[in-house]
Amino acid sequence: MMPAMHQPPTIDDAARRSGVVWVDLGRGPQVAWHLWHDGALWLVCGGREQDLPGSGTAERAVVSIRSKQTQNDVVARFEAQVSRVEPGSKAWTSVVPLLHEKRLNPPDGEAQPDRWARESLVLRLSPTQPRLTGRSPVS
């Protein structure tokens, strides 16, 4: 019987298991909470939400997902195309309720999605040219 080979996680697996990711929008990596949905990473930033420098202008990003156990080892890294999700769009209508559900301790409860529409950005980071790694240290 052949021993099982350890396979590095797919982006999908790693992103679903991770509560946070490291996102570099061209100004250095920043930690961010996220939602993995429909093959993309979704983020809310700006206003009272997480600060991600470059989020208003970035077209590309590098996303690193670290090991939950060590937080020092990257289990997946990929390049992504950044697109802004406009309030009222089909994408907004489908993903904002999921982001709202995932957001811990919203300061304004059920009014949170309306606040996001007024003062925050919802971003979709779609993987392009994935480069998966298996346990390589982050410098």
Image (tube, rainbow, N blue to C red):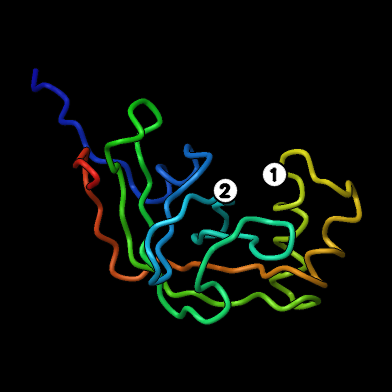
Left or right for 69, reference 136: right
Disc 2 crowd, CA 10 A, few/some/many (<14, 14-19, 20+): many
Task: Choose the circle earlier in sequence order: 2 or 1.
Answer: 2
- The residue lying at 38 percent from left, 46 percent from top is 65
Residue 53 percent coordinates (x, y)? 51, 68
Q: Are marks 2 and 1 in contact (CB under 8 Å)?
A: yes
Above or below: residue 72 compared with residue 21: above
Q: Which mark is residue 102?
A: 1
Left or right for 128, reference 133: right
Above or below: residue 51 compared with residue 135: below
Camera-nearest label, 2 or 1: 2
Q: What residue is shown with label 2?
A: 33
Residue 90 percent coordinates (x, y)? 74, 75
Badge 1 marks a residue whose secondary structure is: helix
What number of labels is visible?
2
- The residue lying at 36 percent from left, 34 percent from top is 71
Residue type at mark 1 is: Lys
Left or right for 129, reference 107: left
